[in-house]
Amino acid sequence: MSINYSLGFKTANPGKKGPKRKVYATAQYTRVCGAEAIMEYVARHTSVQDRAEVYSVVCAVVDCMRERLLDGDRVELGDLGTFYCVIKSKGAESTESFDPGKHIRGVSVNWRPGKRFRDLGRDAKYRFVPRRATVAERLRRETEYFNSQLPPKRPSRPQPLTPAAGLSPEEARGRQVIDAAEALLLRLASRDEAQASETTGESR
C-alpha cells in the first residue's frame, strides 16, 4: 500500500520576501473505493456474510447520524472520528435584525478524524506518479502518433440512418458503429502485415 503523489510549483509565503514559488507534493488517487467495495470488505471480515445486510446496517447508521446532526448533536464514532455541523451565514447589522431565513446560507458537516486516521502519516508509504494532466497529454500525443502510422483510410460514402433491411434507426446506428470498429481492425491488421513484411525483407 502506498499513497501516490505528484510534484508541482506553488506560491510560498505570499507577501513575504524570499522565493515566491516552491515545489510541493500533492496527493493523487488512482482508484475510487465505492460503497460496493466497502460492503464486500465488511462481509469478508465480519460475521455478517450478506452484503445486502451490511448495506442496510450502513444505511441505518447514516440515517441515524443525519437525524442527530439535524437535532444539533455532535456525533462521535470512536476511531472513525467526530462529525459536527457548521453554519454558513452572512452578516447582519445587529442581533435584532438577524433573520435565520435571510442570513443563514446553509449548513455543512465537518469531520474531525479519530486516532486511526490521525496517525496515517506514521504508517504511510509514498510513491511518485506523474500528474494526471501530464498523463493525459502523453496519451493524446501517443494516440496522434499511432493514428499517423495507420494506412490511409479509403473514402466511403456514409450510410443513411434510415431503416434498411428490416433494421430500426437504433439498430442502423449500432450497425454503423460495428462497421467502423471492423474497419479500424482491418486498418490495424494491414499495418501489422506491412511491418511484418518489412521485417522479413530485412532479415533476408
Image (cartoon, rainbow, N blue to C red):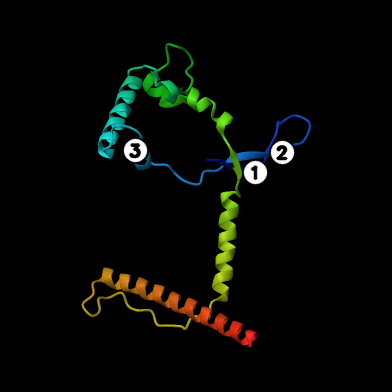
In the orientation shown, which residue stands out farthest toward the left?
166
Q: Which mark is residue 44?
A: 3
Query: Which badge, 3 or 2, is on the more N-terminal residue?
Result: 2
Residue 119: x, y in percent? 54, 26
Question: Viewed as shown, does residue 165 lie left or right of 177?
Answer: left
Question: In this picture, is 120 found above or below 180?
Answer: above
**How busy is the neighbourhood of tag 2: few (under 14 within 10 Å), some, or many (20 plus)?**
few
Q: Nearer the viewer, residue 196 or 177?
A: 196
Question: In this picture, is 199 found above or below 127?
Answer: below
**How busy is the neighbourhood of tag 1: few (under 14 within 10 Å), some, or many (20 plus)?**
some
Question: Viewed as shown, does residue 47 lie left or right of 30?
Answer: left
Query: Disc 1 to disc 3, how far (Cα)?
Result: 37 Å
Query: Which badge, 1 or 3, is on the more N-terminal residue?
Result: 1
User: What residue is at 61 percent from the left and 87 percent from the top?
Assistant: 201
Identify the amino acid type marked 2.
Lys
Residue 52 shows in the view: yes
User: What residue is at 59 percent from the left and 69 percent from the top?
Assistant: 145
Residue 52: x, y in percent? 26, 38
Identify the amino acid type marked 1.
Leu
Q: Which SS class for mark 3?
A: helix
Query: Which badge, 1 or 2, is on the more N-terminal residue?
Result: 1
Q: Choose top left, top right, bottom left or bottom right for residue 172.
A: bottom left
Query: Disc 3 to disc 2, how far (Cα)?
Result: 45 Å
Which residue position is annotated with label 1? 7
